[in-house]
Image: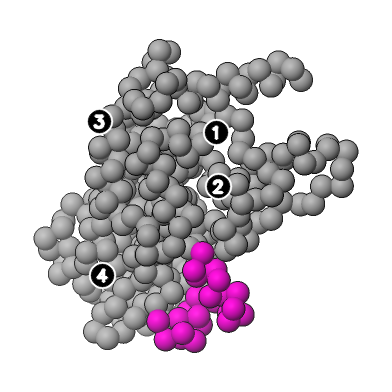
Amino acid sequence: MLYDSNGRAFELGDEIGCGREGSVYRIVGEPFVAKIYHNPTPQIARKIESMAAILSVLFERKKQLLLKLAWPLGALYERSDGRGFKGFFMYGVPEEFVSIDVVSQFPGNPTAPRMSERQKIEMLIDLCMLTSELHAIGITLGDWNPRNILVGERGSLMLLDTDSYAFTLSDVSYQTTCAAPGYIAPEVLKLMETTGVSDFESLAAATNAPVFTPQTDDFGLAVHIFKMLNRGIHPYASGELDLEIFDLGDDIPPAPSLNSCVCNGRSPFVGTLVGHVIPVYALELDDFGNLMGEAFRRSLFGKAQERLDARTWARLLDRCLSETVQCQRGHHLYHASQDECPYCRGEHALLARLADC
């Protein structure tokens, strides 16, 4: 049995998830779930208590945000007098919601919610606006792990692990403590490399500055937009071997990690990962149209200050959605500036390769 700050008792039910920081359980007889930390610390307790305390004030004018955030509603303790911090409770997520990566997978994943191509783009716009609203009230997401972004029917959104968000309250700064490989902005990775500090809280203390900012969020957001519009392919994924350079019988070096590619700006999509090309079914940057292609170049491969912010991404996606046409097969939406559907072209190229095998 666990208790909230008012001494109200909560009985934990089945475990429904487990992550790096803790496990999630149903709460018997309640519409809530509980996140119980593997290693609860006084620092985590203060952050959760602060997040629960500012709930009503922070979102007073933005109540719609709460419908899309698994925000801590209250801390949970071992004892009814508020001692022995263990975790927090929050509203649960409908079981039909899946990770955003499931939606972007190619070929399509049968467990993904039914969504049209238009609804996928509208979902991205919603994600951009949600990010922009959080930035406007001083909150940085930090960790863009795909498991933290859940998608339901018709593109409804829910963001998890909000306890990892970074913000400042009463002159106390709360930092993001973990982030998924491949979604950490290159300037953060370079800072970790030059300082030799891999712990984000220690890195913030060493540099006397926040590690994660709206600009670093802009990178993680752009990665998700790119993946959703490009068959789930990460912009820094190593792709395929360039057979004009390598023979399949050669002693081929292992592909570098995602973080290494991001840190050093190596990607087959901009020709900076020697010996690798994009997958045959992938879209090139120019296939998205001039504006979108340039947005990806700036936000994924340019300097931090050149990135599009979340609200600008929302406007651009909305504009590009109005400029799309449907392919003859009725399966895809693509930019009207293209002579043919780049998605169909990629599928035909993949089928031709498989036929030759």
As measured in the structure, the alpha-carbon distance from the residue carrying label 2 to the one carrying label 3 is 27 Å
Question: Is residue 356 placed above or below 243 in the rendered structure?
Answer: above
Give the magenta part as a residue range. Answer: 186-209
Q: Earlier in the sequence, mark 3 or mark 4?
A: 4
Q: Is residue 215 visible?
A: yes
Tell me which residue sits at (58%, 81%) in the image.
195
* Mark toward the viewer: 1 or 2: 2
Image coordinates for residue 262, horizontal then vertical, percent: 56, 58
The mark that comes first in sequence, 2 or 3, is: 2
Helix, strand, or loop for circle 3? helix
SS class of the residue under badge 4? loop
Q: Which residue is mark 4?
A: 138
Which mark is on residue 322?
Answer: 3
Label 1 to label 2, Cα distance in Å? 13 Å
Q: Report how far apart the C-alphas of labels 1 and 4 lie in the structure.
A: 36 Å
Given residues 347 and 162, the one toward you in this image is: 347
- The foreground one among 113 and 171 is 171
Mark 4 or mark 1, which is nearer the start of the sequence? Answer: 4
Residue 102: where, in percent of width, then height?
48, 38
Q: In the image, is residue 78 part of the stretch drawn in magenta?
A: no
Cα separation, mark 3 vs mark 1, equals 23 Å
Amino acid at circle 4: Gly
The residue that label 1 is drawn on is 282
Q: Nearer the viewer, mark 2 or mark 4?
A: 2
Residue at screen point 80% across, 41% down: 246
CB of mark 3 within 8 Å of CB of mark 1? Answer: no
Please tell me in which quadrant of the rendered image residue 310 appears.
bottom left
Give the class, few, some or many, for how many residues have Cα within 10 Å of label 1's Cα (few <14, many ≥20).
Answer: many
Eye-nearest disc, 3 or 4: 3
Q: Which mark is residue 270?
A: 2
